[in-house]
Amino acid sequence: MRLHREGYTIMLTTGLVLLALNLLAYFYLFSDNSIAISLLAAASLVLFGLIVQFFRVPNRQLTLSDRQVIAPADGTVVVIEETDESEYFKARRRQISIFMSPLNVHVNRNPVSGIVRYFKYYPGKYLVAWHPKSSTENERTTVVIETANGVEVLFRQIAGAVARRIRWYVKENQPVEQGQEMGFIKFGSRVDVFIPLDAEVKVNIGDRMKGGVTVLAELP
């Protein structure tokens, strides 16, 4: 396991602030109260541990297949439905949505290999990630990858009420590999994936996903 580069500044800043706070408490605020000092130290360790675990990147054996769409993120499947995709396809597609809690790994990965045919970033609101309008009103990105077989898969990084920073590492006309890191969303969020209607969905609502590993669907 390693720690993601997106967390270096946050982890260093948090560590220094907590260290300064504990030193201040030890020498000045609670110098005669060992219980208060111990409680503050314990709370600081827990907080720092939570932040560090958020930026963890576990070692995984990635699933690689030209005919499969792989989960782009860890989390829980909260939506599987046929819907109108109005931004790019302007047609009916199958939507699979994965909600990422603050305890999930937050690396985002390419669900398929191919060429990035479309990319757009939208600033926006910070509605809770499960809100019906979060897909169209929150801060988000839209990415479309065309596979070698000519099938286009669209997916969106969507910020939530806590997540306020989306990172991406792709651009239009860039070749990408399935399972490769394409971005990161900080502190809780959601990813929507749009696949053809004739693709065979392999997951159910409530299933827990492993980014880069779990098969979402079989392409036609």
Image (tube, rainbow, N blue to C red):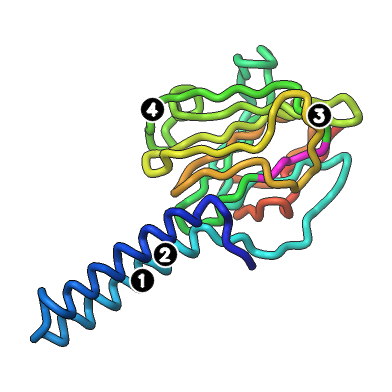
Q: CA distance from mark 3 to mark 4?
A: 29 Å
Given residues 201 and 69, the one toward you in this image is 69
The three-letter code of the residue at mark 1 reads Val
Q: Is residue 69 left or right of residue 158?
A: right
Element class at badge 1: helix
Mark closer to the observer (3, 4): 3
Q: CA distance from mark 2 to mark 4?
A: 25 Å
Residue 108 at x, y percent in the picture:
63, 45
Residue interval drawn in magenta: 109-113
Q: CA distance from mark 3 to mark 1?
A: 42 Å
The three-letter code of the residue at mark 2 reads Leu
Q: Which residue is mark 1?
A: 46
Residue located at (60% from left, 50% from top):
107
Quarter residue 22 falls in = bottom left
Q: Which residue is mark 3?
A: 115
Residue 83 at x, y percent in the picture:
61, 22
Per the picture, the main secondary structure of the magenta-coloured stretch is loop
Q: Which residue is mark 4?
A: 125
Given residues 178 and 27, the one toward you in this image is 27
The image quadrant where one finds the C terminus is top right
Which numbered marker is on residue 130? none
Q: Crowding at label 2, few (<14), some or many (≥20) Cα neighbours within 10 Å?
A: few
Quarter residue 126 falls in = top left
Residue located at (44% from left, 49% from top):
187
Residue located at (8% from left, 86% from top):
32
Q: How many marks?
A: 4
Residues marked 2 and 4 touching at CB (< 8 Å): no
Residue located at (73% from left, 54% from top):
213
The three-letter code of the residue at mark 4 reads Lys
